[in-house]
Amino acid sequence: DGNELSEILTYIDEEATDRSTTDLAGIAEGKNVIFVWLESLQTFVINNELHGEEITPFLNSLIDDSYYFENFYHQTEQGKTADSEFVSETSLYPLPSGAVYFTHGDNTYQSLPQMLGESGYSTSVFHANNGSFWNRNVMYGTLGIDHFYDINAYNVTDDNTVGWGLKDKDFFEQSMKYLTSLQEPYYTRMITLTNHHPFSLDEEDATLMPFDSNSRTLNQYFQTVRYLDESLELFFDELKAAGEYDDAIIVLMGDHYGISDFHDRAMAMYLDKEEITPYDHIQLQRVPLYIHIPGEKGEVISTVSGQVDIKPTLLHLLGIEDDNELGFGTNMFGENRKDFIALRDGSFITEDVIYTKGLFYDRVSGELIEETDVLLELKERAQQELTYSDQLIYGDLLRFHDLNQ
Ligand code: GP9
Ligand code: MN
């Protein structure tokens, strides 16, 4: 009801809003936005090696001229890719169970594509899967996405298919003709697929030897990660050749983990650890985030952040300042950020600590630390925030709120 909504809006206003500005405000004003979803890509492979070789040579070199967030966490649950799409575009949390894309696909939301649409952007998604998968064809309408280039936009054959569908290199190549005809300025998301469990790859596409452990899944993961890395390099080349590169900002984000804790033994072996502790588990929930602005030098940013922060951050860079913007994230470049990143299971991360499964750890060293009243209060706050987000969604409360800019 109204009271519930106003309590939540007050919380957001007081605790989850950063009104500070930065030198980067509006730096990408009017530019096209190309937002690439990196299926199952986790941060532990970046700047790491297998058999003495870089796993992701292109993504490693891209750090040099991008804003690269090395402590960025996914916040997804059972809705996997769909959850990552939801949290990034609405700055609300996905639900504790089920996929909000299915269960609340008709709600009122304040989404990034809607807001960009109101500022004159055309909005689209490219993904070579059935439009109904994850209820995307319904939810994209709800989120204000104008056009969905789904599997019907692609020429999918036995030769260019592996695992879940169209290979990423073919996906990017075939997308170019549509991308170049989008109405500018455009905001578009491109969702990759090849680096998806069970990480199958044709022999001819494997340019890295598999890892050697008891987990076939992890062994093959490095190979499909390398393939994803190569497909991104190819995509950047195509963007440059087509003249799309200079006018765009390119955002690359891992959607969620690819290697579950079922493979902890093999993971510990790769990371040269005795075991994967609950602390390690949380650190393995980091996914890469790159904000690449051609002509900008960028920086490696170590501040803790998460997918919930994407919407306010992109609006800041695009110069779309809106006092009515609401959500649980804060601008990743801001000075007065909210001081925790909540994961969907109630674990959270601050600059100093990681909380998970009832215990607090020093974020950097991983040492267990004593719980204090301050830490317990933070834990309550993270839980409260997740509950507020759930209430907004379950009650479809934003329909009672004036979302106009
Ligand atoms: C399906 C693709 C993968 O279209 O986005 O979904 P996931 O299984 O990762 O949620
Ligand atoms: Mn996914």
Image: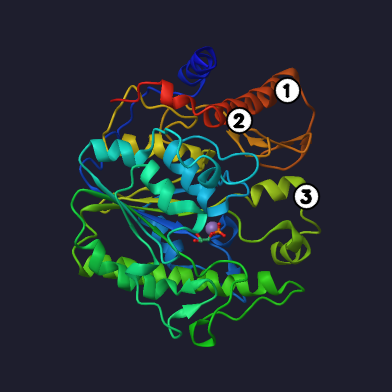
What is the CA distance from the residue labelled 2 to the residue labelled 1? Answer: 16 Å
Local secondary structure at mark 3: loop
Amino acid type, mark 2 = Leu
Q: Residue at x 80, y 28 (%)?
A: 370
Among the two numbered marks 1 and 3 on one chain, the one whose residue lies closer to the N terminus: 3
| On-image quarter of the C terminus | top left
> Under tag 2, what secondary structure?
helix
> How many numbered markers are drawn?
3
Compared to residue 215, the image places residue 6 above or below, namely above
Task: Give residue 231's position: percent from left, percent from top.
Answer: 41, 71
N-terminal of the pair, mark 2 or mark 3, is 3
Residue 175, horizontal then vertical, whole percent: 31, 67
Q: Residue at x 71, y 50 (%)?
A: 280
Residue 227 lies, in percent from the top left, at 48, 74
Amino acid type indicated by mark 3: Thr
In this view, 165 is above or below 134: below
Q: CA distance from mark 2 to mark 3?
A: 25 Å
Mark 1 is on which residue type?
Leu
Q: Are marks 1 and 3 in contact (CB under 8 Å)?
A: no
Q: Image height check: is 313 above or below 255?
A: above
Residue behind label 1 places its C-beta within 8 angstroms of ligand 2: no
| Observer-nearest of 382 and 81 | 81
Q: Mark 3 = which residue?
A: 277
Q: Nearer the viewer, mark 2 or mark 3?
A: 2
In the image shown, does 113 or 343 lie closer to the viewer?
113
For label 1, the residue is 376
Task: Confirm whether residue 347 shows in the render.
Answer: yes
The reply to whether residue 71 is in sight is no
Number of other residues with Cα within 10 Å of mark 2, as a class: few under 14, some 14 to 19, many 20 or more: many
Q: Which residue is mark 2?
A: 386
Q: Nearer the viewer, residue 189 or 20?
A: 189
